[in-house]
Amino acid sequence: MADHVQPPSSNDEAYFRNNLHSVRALVGSNTRLDEVAHAIFISLGPLDFLANLPDVTGEVSERLKKLNGVDVERLYQITPRDFALISYQTENSFVALVTEVRMMLVRIVRQYAPQAFFTIDQQELIQVFNLGRHAPKIQDLLARLEVDLPRMKREGGGVRPLSVSDIERLTQVLDRMPLDQFVADFVTWQPVVRVRQNDMPRMIFHEHYISMRKLHDTFLQGVNLFTNMNLFKLLTTELDKRILACIREEYLNPARGSFNFNVETLLSASFEQAANAGHAKGMVIELQISDVFADYPRFRLAQQQLTKAGAKLALDGITPEMTDVLRCENLGSSYVKVRLDQAMPDRADFAANLRRMIEAGVHIVGTRVESEDAVYNGMRLGMGRFQGFYVNKLLRPGAERDRFMVS
């Protein structure tokens, strides 16, 4: 039996090219135009800052083989950090498989890169295609990966830590970049959606954030952004200034979205200028719960500043267990984002905690929603707002909404 996911070397370019050509041939020879022939592409590119990426890739390979519904004969490693899985299954079985793959990748990120869990654009970890309808897109993706193979091989030797000079150099480059180009190239967003039984999902607002992956690949290749978290915070604080400039110049609409800022940014002159000009009014500003723990007095100052500016606070990164001890309704938050990507604690206690916050006027958002079950479980607990991989697909038109397809 040929093993497409155990190459003799992580930099064996000939091996990967052979696998790329095998997948290309499978796609090209497909004659099924129904909804049971799919290609799933898994990329560990967002984790390429890890010094032990080959070990992580091997772990992903082994976990993929153990998932129900994975045919090892149709599982290929096509680059040092990318896999392709060809699947022929009924729709229900396929949706279950995609959900399992997504959850496995979330666990990998949490295990090997916990410091980057909230900054990795997880939508870049997996793409799903229908072989019949999306054949040209699949062939384009395979061609791009083959072109990138030599670069991946060169970068396989390791990475160096982020430095102050890296931040200074990046800042100088971004200062010369037009704001509209910065938004188009590096700002992305994910919807927060209201879901009600027997009703169409409705988008409430978009969470805007900078794709650190794109920024890294464009300007900081070979640099580990997360070795020194103090420097990483300095980097994101500089990027906050760029986002505020985009808001001031109306390249981003604060009334239709939420924005992740550092506490230091909310206490800065840049935010004060934006607030005085009325740009913060109605904006949802997201802070991590870790900001509360890191320096509570400064968090309170930041919370007062954003409230004075007419903005609303969203606390992110809350786990179900935290609701037993945290009184988020007393922290000035309009929104509380509770992660649904792990097993829930005792349902009765958790439901009571959520009800306590809702009765205090807090809007609960279930995040990291990777499956239909997570939505239903959240709704049974009183949640009506959700965000995550699965939720993104609910806003797609027609039949696309019912499957994990790319647009």
Image (tube, helix red, strand yellow):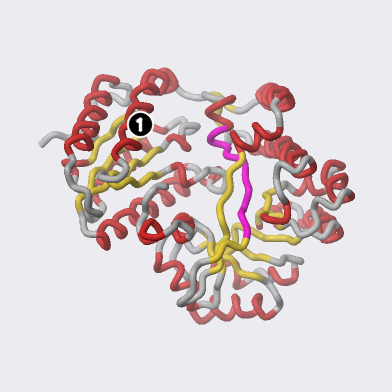
The percent coordinates of residue 169 (x first, y second) are 69, 21
Number of marks drawn? 1
128 left or right, relative to 382 = left
Q: Secondary structure at mark 1?
A: helix
In this orientation, does residue 203 appear? yes
Q: Nearer the viewer, residue 374 or 284?
A: 284
- Asked if the stretch drawn in magenta spans residue 325, the answer is no
State the residue in front, 348 or 42.
42
At label 1, which amino acid type do we have? Asp
Residue that mark 1 sits on: 140
Most frequent secondary structure within the magenta stretch: strand
Between residue 244 and residue 307, name the one nearer to us: 244
Residue in front for this viewpoint, 76 or 229: 76
Magenta stretch, residue numbers? 205-214
Seen in the picture, residue 156 relative to 402 is either above or below; the reply is above
Task: Measuring from the top left, give residue 332's x and y in whole percent.
Answer: 76, 66
Q: Quadrant of residue 176?
A: top right
